[in-house]
Image (cartoon, rainbow, N blue to C red):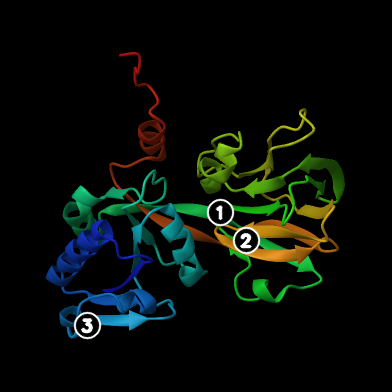
Amino acid sequence: MKIAVYSQYYPEKSSKSFDELISVLRQNEVDIYIEKSFFEHISEDLKAQTSIHSFSELNESFDLLISIGGDGTILRAITYVRDFSIPIVGINTGRLGFLATIQTDEIETAISHILNGNYKTSERTLLSVETHPDNDDLKQTNFALNEIAVSRKNTTSMIIVETHLNDEYLTSYWADGLIVATPTGSTGYSLSCGGPVITPDANSFVLTPIAPHNLNARPLVIPDDTTIKLKVDGREDQHLMSLDSRIITLSNATLITIKKANFKIKMVELLDESFIDTLRMKMLWGEDKRN
């Protein structure tokens, strides 16, 4: 079995989780490939192990990718996974963790189950984006798992986001920005801006304005086969567009087209795990906090 390991940082909590993970993987005699920049942080003793290698790119020969960190780490990991259909396992050393659902005290048991094939996968829809004129920063990575958002840059003034759905004019949002979120992303940035929670298997996207100045603007759930076109105007000549955690600058003359990506990401879940359970636990639903 060929397994990739990805992380961004090496604080004490991640270090302990990483060491425990590597121990479990070595016990199961798998080939371990650690992301190149993270590989530089590990001990020389581990680097010397014949079963441990580094990678800078992935391909279809990998059986799993294990991410150590929070949800943000997984969002960066998908830029390696791309459309290779490699299932992703998330070990949560961050905070909330809707995607990274394996807790640090579950590593040995959970990873052993997964290596033995005792798991299920949840397929997650992604967004893709094109711009006219073309933008060089999007040529290699033009997709996002959580959301694509446009927002103001270098100004405290609002922007105007002219929005079309399937070439039909919807509205012009006067706001700090606009989020287009997937069901996976509905529990992230969109939720913090008042958007609804959408279950991962729903065939929907949500448009969520960021601090709208026209107070009748509300989040809107749309079918995920909708083509969304955005055009930004404002006092500045440029604005920002974010794809999950990656940010680029665009001219206000740019036409942005957002669609459902032509591939999905596979998230690994334990057999006794469900989105509803995770949602209830993370949102503290059903708990009496009056005492």
Q: Earlier in the sequence, mark 3 or mark 1?
A: 3
Disc 2 crowd rating (10 Å Cα; few below 14, some 14-19, many 20+) is some
Looking at this view, is 128 or 266 the one in front? 128
- Residue 50 disc label: none
Q: Quadrant of the N terminus?
A: bottom left
**Disc 1 secondary structure class:** strand
Q: Which residue is mark 1?
A: 125
Q: Amino acid at mark 2?
A: Ala
Disc 3 crowd rating (10 Å Cα; few below 14, some 14-19, many 20+) is some
CA gap, disc 3 and disc 2: 37 Å
Q: Amino acid at mark 1?
A: Thr
Q: x, y (%) of residue 204? A: 62, 43
Q: Which residue is mark 2?
A: 261
CA gap, disc 1 and disc 2: 7 Å
Q: Amino acid at mark 3?
A: Lys
Q: Are marks 1 and 2 in contact (CB under 8 Å)?
A: yes
Q: Earlier in the sequence, mark 1 or mark 2?
A: 1
Q: x, y (%) of residue 240? A: 70, 59
Q: x, y (%) of residue 168? A: 86, 46
> In which quadrant of the rendered view does residue 118 lie?
bottom left
**Disc 3 secondary structure class:** helix
Q: Which residue is mark 3?
A: 47
Q: Are marks 3 and 1 in contact (CB under 8 Å)?
A: no
Of the two numbered discs 3 and 1 in the rendering, the one whose residue sits closer to the viewer: 3
Q: Is residue 221 visible?
A: no
Q: Who's the residue at 19% across and 65% down the image?
A: 19
